[in-house]
Image: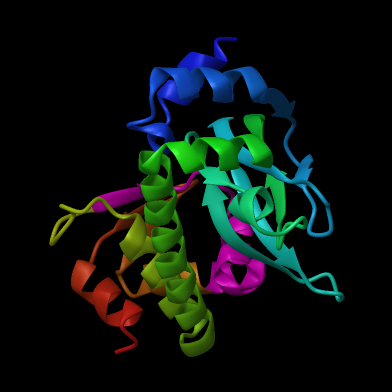
Amino acid sequence: MDITKQIKDIGLFAGISAEKLDLLARQATYKTFKPGEMVIGETDSIRSFYVVVSGQLKLYRSSVEGKEQTLQLLGPGDPFGLCTAFATESFPASAMAIEESSVLLIPGTVMETVARQEPALLFNIIQILSQRLKDSMTLIESLALKEIPGRLASFLRHALPKNAVDKKSAVELTISQRELAKILGATPESLSRALRKMASDGILATAGRTITILDHKALEQLAEGE
C-alpha cells in the first residue's frame, strides 16, 4: 500500500512538509487486526504512535473484577498512543479492534524528531489532545452524575447530526448494543430496559442498530437530568 498517501490524507498531518511526510511513511509499519484482536494492552511497553487507517477500534480499561469501561471509539484517521510516543513507555488503556481494522505504527523517536521541526504537527496534536480532554470530562460527568437513561440520552444527543432539531432523525450505531453498554458504564440488560422505557415514552424508536429520535425536547430534558 502507499503509506505516504495514507498519511497525507490524515488530518493529524495537515500542513506537514512533503519531505517529513515521506520520512514518516518510510518509518511507519502497516498492520491489520481481526475483530476482537488486541492492538495494545494496558501493560504493554511500546513507544509508538498509532493511527487508524480503516475499521474501528475501542479504547477501554478493565478492573481486576473484569468489569470493562469503554473510553473512546476510534475510526479511520484517528490517532492514539500519544503518551507512548512522547512521554511514558506503557499505554494507560487497552486498544482492541471491533471490526477488521488496519493501523499505522510510527516509532515515537521519529514522531519526536518531526514534531521538533514541524510546528504544524505540534499544533495538530494539541488540538486532538484538547478535544480528547473535553470528551473525557464529559464521560466522567455522565458516569458520575447521571443514571443510565440520562447517559443514553447524552450519547444520542452527541451522535445526532448538528441540524437535527424538532424533526425525526436517526442515529446509525456502528457498534453493537453490548459495546454501547460498555461506553455508558451499564449492563446490556439495563441498557435494553432504558431503550424500552424511552420507546414507550415516545422519545425514540429502535430498529436493529438504527435509533430514531421522535421527541427531541424530551431527549434534551433527559440528557440534562430534568
Q: How many numbered circles are shown?
A: 0
Name the one closer to the observer, 132 or 167. 132
Residue 219, horizontal then vertical, whole percent? 29, 72
- Quarter of the image where the C terminus is located: bottom left
Q: Is residue 184 magenta?
A: yes
Q: Is residue 185 above or below residue 130?
A: below
Q: Is residue 173 above or below residue 76?
A: below
Residue at image location 71% in from the left, 65% down from the top? 61
Taking the view exactly as shown, the residue that stands out farthest to the front is 117
Name the one closer to the observer, 3 or 156. 3
Q: Is residue 120 left or right of residue 189?
A: left
Residue 216, horizontal then vertical, whole percent? 21, 67
- Can see residue 189? yes
Quarter of the figure with residue 205: bottom left
Name the one closer to the observer, 73 or 132. 132
Q: Is residue 45 above or below residue 60?
A: above
Q: Is residue 46 left or right of residue 209?
A: right
Q: Is residue 157 magenta?
A: no
Q: Is residue 94 above or below residue 65?
A: above
Residue at image location 63% in from the left, 29% down from the top? 104
Residue 207, horizontal then vertical, whole percent? 44, 48
Residue at image location 43% in from the left, 30% down from the top? 10
- Can see residue 98? no
Q: Which residues are magenta?
A: 169-193
Taking the view exactly as shown, the residue that stands out farthest to the top is 1
Residue 71, horizontal then vertical, whole percent? 59, 63
Quarter of the figure with residue 62: bottom right
Residue at image location 59% in from the left, 50% down from the top? 176
Name the one closer to the observer, 45 or 63. 45
- Quarter of the image where the N terminus is located: top right
Q: Is residue 160 left or right of residue 129?
A: left
Q: Is residue 161 left or right of residue 173?
A: left
